[in-house]
Amino acid sequence: MTDRNTPGARVFDGVRIADFAWVGVGPNASMQMAFHGAEAIRVESSQRPDTFRSGGPRPTDDRSLDGSAYFAKFNRGKRSVAINLAHPRGPEVAARLIAVSDIVTESFAPGFMQRIGLGYDAVRQIKPNIIMCSMSMEGQTGPHAKFRGFGLTLQATTGITGVTGWPDRPPVGTGVAYTDWVATHVALIGILAALDHRRRSGQGQYIDLSQFEASTLVLDAGLIDAANTGRTARPLGNRDTRFAPHGVYPCADDPSGSDRWVAIAITTDAQWRALAQTMNRADWLSSATLRKTTGRLSAQDELDAEISAWTSQRTVDAVEQLLQAVGVPAHRAASVRDAHEDPQLAHRQHWWPSDHPTIGAMSYESPAWRLSDTPPPRPRRAPLLGEDAAYVYRELCGYSESEFQQLIIEGVVE
Amino acid sequence: MSQDASHEIQGALAPYRIIDLTAEIGALTTMVLAGLGADVIRVEPPGGHPSRRRGPMLRDDDGSSLYWAQMNAGKRSITLDLDDAGDREHLRTLSETADFLFESDAPGVMTSRGLGYGNLHERAPQLIYVSLTPFGQDGPKAHWAASDLIGHVSGGLSSLVGDPDRAPLRPSVEQAYNITALNAASAAMIALHARHLTSLGQHVDVSMQAAMANTLGNARLYWEMDQILTKRAGGARAFADRATRIIYPCADGYVAFVRVPASMPRLHRWMTAVGAEPRFDAEYWASVSIAGDRLPSDDEIEALESEIEHFFIARGAQELYESGQSFSVMICPVNTMRDIVDSPQLAARAFFCEIEDPALGRLTVPGAPLQMSATPWQTRPAPTRGQDQDEILDELAQIRKEPDHAE
């Protein structure tokens, strides 16, 4: 592997993205391209700012739209301009940017881009080989096209919430805007496939990404099963239809209030024997019923109780070490702090430091992938709102200094 | 319901060939790339890929896996025994014809077979070699035993999932595998564009733990900033040291509704319009910022939530969805899989398709996860075991006959 601190390779050098999308999915997708060298320009508005700009956490006393670390998390490596798209001349300025871009992304309510004259048909008049990706909640067409939502609620529409919970209680969902992490990648994969197709064919295209439809990819056989048999998957707690024992068990550190738990997943008969040996359970080792998964699946209640009793007498460190030493899948149920301090993620230099004039020094995630030959350089910090106006309007869009000043005076450029 | 007629037009990745050696963690990676038109060759062990026996089954026999049908849609299949020297040589020759290889063995296993990135790169310098593992190729946990559950908990997400009085939870569909799979497909596409610059493949190392650690929302930032530990809060949004309820029961199931300030006047209008006589102060709740300084008391929140619950419990989930959304309230049903199959939105967009599966017959399957105007998604069935054996081996035999072929 190449040393990741070398200057790095900019795979998408020369690719420009006019990113009209906001909040999670669009900005996250364009950021991955920006990491690898694309010039991603967030087209923002100070009248209607990205809600993440006013969200938390805000590490410094800066209460402006430039103080959110959450916005920074999704927008490192990018530039920002602010256009008032509601101004009669706003769309004209946006069109000038589109004319010099390769990719347009947007996540407005369906119909908005058409209303301001920047729907795909108009955009491809401006730039014939443009790749445009719309990523709304439920797609551009259909009776629910204009229904509102975000990742926290959309995970319920897409079925994730309904399969997350305990069988004897209401479903809970994931507590985070889960579909954001799915739809980001589906958008990214689609855009990069379209860009590759354009290299060969010279042809751009339009991508209608419904975050609902995209997010159903992670349901495994859930939909095909329901569609062909009428069955519908139910939440199983931490249990699995194929493996046992399979759960998250309390550790001895727990009574201190530290909320310590360890996950143990027995996926093979060999792992079962290793677990039984480690727990000194000769009776389990000699049991013909428990030797096979089917027997263990029927004995889950008893096994879970016994394993809980065993883990409760040990620290999470001890259980991890004892079980991993014999090849049994076990890992602490990492807290957010554990993830932040995890030695393996530290080894991968997963959390990238980034300094910022109003947010200060914070670290943010890097991609889950490592490229041996073209590792990206560390990204530029997230942009201040409208920070790159002069570069974008003067250099890219070709406005003269007096035209640029006029746009500011008229309130087109914010 | 639509008949899929997109086959005449090629998918975006039609020129590319993919060798798929992965276990379950990589099935979705190559399924997506196959949907985008790539020629994906699923390499199965002689007894067939283990996930062919994974439920749910269409029929009572264990040869009718709907899991296999879904996760291997659009792929071809060849059977190779990687413990056999001749078959390993077939794989090396096959790698010369391929653009990508995906594998998910523990670090070092493929190299021990002479099939690691270093081994193949010499003969197939164009090959983009993608490894999906629980923790990555190197580092202190690189050789830890793992599974989907382990991947899920190792990234920290389980600490944000579940009721506070019980253990941290994972979703009952394997999300750590699938999120990793999608990351791997993204990474492979980036490496493809890199190849346009360098003319060379490279090794892509994807970590399940890292993929899951990237799903923590703002929670890790709150820890880093102020050592505020966000914790699971049941059917609620986990947000720093406070949580906002999301899940509410309704007449026939559950709905998801988040109390964001902007929604409160709309909720008030909606309830008024349907005669529910809201008592809460819409103006006050619209001014309460989730992240901000004005925090309502626990009693105020409880009174509001109980009023909302009372309103929801008298109505069905789909009715609340249609009705609430007509007032621009961000509400949605907690859909079961069957609800999704019945979705009028998906029906209007012809999301589900019918295909002829060679093993299972006529099937209704989920279609395009994204609609691409010039290079439509390809909805095709999964392969039977080794169905493309002869065709692929013949092609390899031809390659070996070529005079400049390096043995």
Image (cartoon, rainbow, N blue to C red):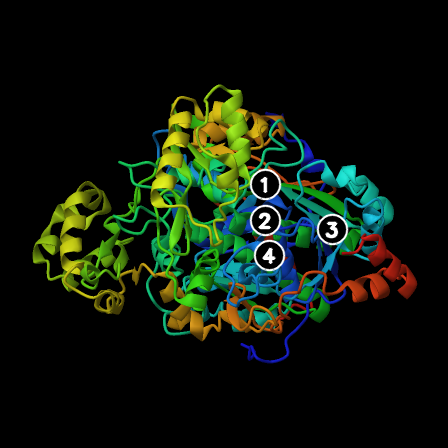
Along the line of sight, the residue nearer the viewer: B406 or A288 = A288
The amino acid type found where label 2 is placed reads Val
Q: Does label 1 lie on the same chain as label 2?
A: no
Q: Chain of mark 3?
A: A
Q: Does label 1 lie on the same chain as label 3?
A: no
Q: Residues within 10 Å of mark 1 (few under 14, many from 20)?
A: many
Coordinates of residue A275 in the picture (x, y in percent)? 19, 59
Mark 2 = which residue?
A186
Q: Secondary structure at mark 4?
A: helix
Coordinates of residue A133 in the picture (x, y in percent)? 69, 46
**3D distance between C-alphas at marks 2 and 1:** 8 Å
Contact between marks 3 and 1 (CB within 8 A): the answer is: no
Q: Nearer the viewer, mark 4 or mark 1?
A: 4
Q: From what the image shows, is residue A25 above or below residue B313?
A: below
Q: Residues within 10 Å of mark 3 (few under 14, many from 20)?
A: many
Q: Earlier in the sequence, mark 4 or mark 2?
A: 4
Q: Quadrant of residue B133?
A: bottom left
**Which disc number belongs to residue B369?**
1
**3D distance between C-alphas at marks 3 and 2:** 16 Å
- Residue, x 59% and y 33% (percent of image)? A147
**3D distance between C-alphas at marks 3 and 4:** 21 Å
Q: Is residue A236 left or right of residue A306?
A: right
Coordinates of residue B382 in the picture (x, y in percent)? 52, 40
Q: Chain of mark 4?
A: A
Mark 3 = which residue?
A104
Q: Does label 4 lie on the same chain as label 3?
A: yes
The quadrant of the picture occupied by the C terminus of chain B is bottom right
